[in-house]
Image (cartoon, rainbow, N blue to C red):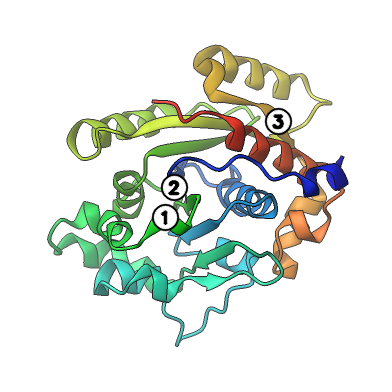
Amino acid sequence: MSSRGQEEVWPRPESCRVISVANQKGGVGKTTTTVNIAAALAMHGQRVLVVDLDPQGNASTALSMERDNRTRSIYHCLVEDEEIRKLAQPVPDIPNLWCAPATIDLAGAEIELVSLVAREARLKRAFAAYDTSDLDYILIDCPPSLGLLTVNAMVACDEVMIPIQCEYYALEGLGQLLRNVELVQSHLNPGLAVSTILLTMYDGRTRLSQQVADEVRSHFGDTVLKTLIPRSVRVSEAPSYGQSVMTYDPGSSGALAYLEAAREIAHRAKRH
């Protein structure tokens, strides 16, 4: 299956799709999803930029980005108007994939942005100055909060992807996230839509996982991808080697699931 998948080039979108991966709950698989979906898309002919908007910088680590005191990061774009093109670094071993990294400086950005003009639209302005005609996807890894960084991501994107873990508290807090999406939609970005929901950390041995999956599907219908991302040791191990699971162990259940999820995203018409 994976060898067949590697040869296939997936259809390119008509224009660059900008997707925020958001959920204010921590530990639901936002970063893992961003990194592996981006890698899978790039491996199938898509040109992808990952923007790491999380001060923890885990997506940057998983994509082998250098992150020291001298690194110019997405912080410099938001606060100092640095061009994203100058910040984006190619990801080793995966052609067509770039990453605008995060550094710990980003932790202070929430406070520094407060006094800036049009503080909610700093990232949107940076994208507007970037010629996205040579990109097919921009995936934004949001921090686990609903602060100014996440608002910047939602103002700058067209679509929101929400990873939901198949556990008891899965839907708790989701209402607040959806209300925030609606607020951004009504005041700052009328074109914003929740286009994709991805079920993560699925454990087929438990009835609970199945119940949560059924409940999410009954609430959100076709917005939910058919593919379920299983709990996988390989997915957890990959970042410690500075890799996505797509390159670390392409034959693992986690990599195959993310491959299928990325295929679904690529073949879906953009929904509004």
> CA gap, disc 2 to disc 3?
26 Å
Q: Nearer the viewer, residue 75 or 168?
A: 75
Left or right for 244, reference 101? right
Q: From the viewer's perspective, is the residue at label 1 or at label 3 nearer?
A: 1
Label 1: which residue? Answer: 133
> Does the rendering let one see residue 57?
no
What's under tag 3, amino acid-wise? Leu
Q: Secondary structure at mark 1?
A: helix
Tell me residue 91's x, y (percent): 62, 69
| Contact between labelled residues 2 and 1, with CB atoms less than 8 Å apart | yes
Label 3: which residue? Answer: 228
Q: Which mark is residue 253?
A: none
> Does the rendering let one see residue 140?
yes
Tell me residue 5's x, y (percent): 79, 43
> CA gap, disc 1 to disc 2?
7 Å
**In the displayed structure, would residue 7 be above or below residue 108?**
above
Q: Secondary structure at mark 3?
A: strand
Tell me residue 240's x, y (percent): 72, 67
The N terminus lies in quadrant: top right
Sequence order check: which comes first, mark 1 or mark 2?
Answer: 2
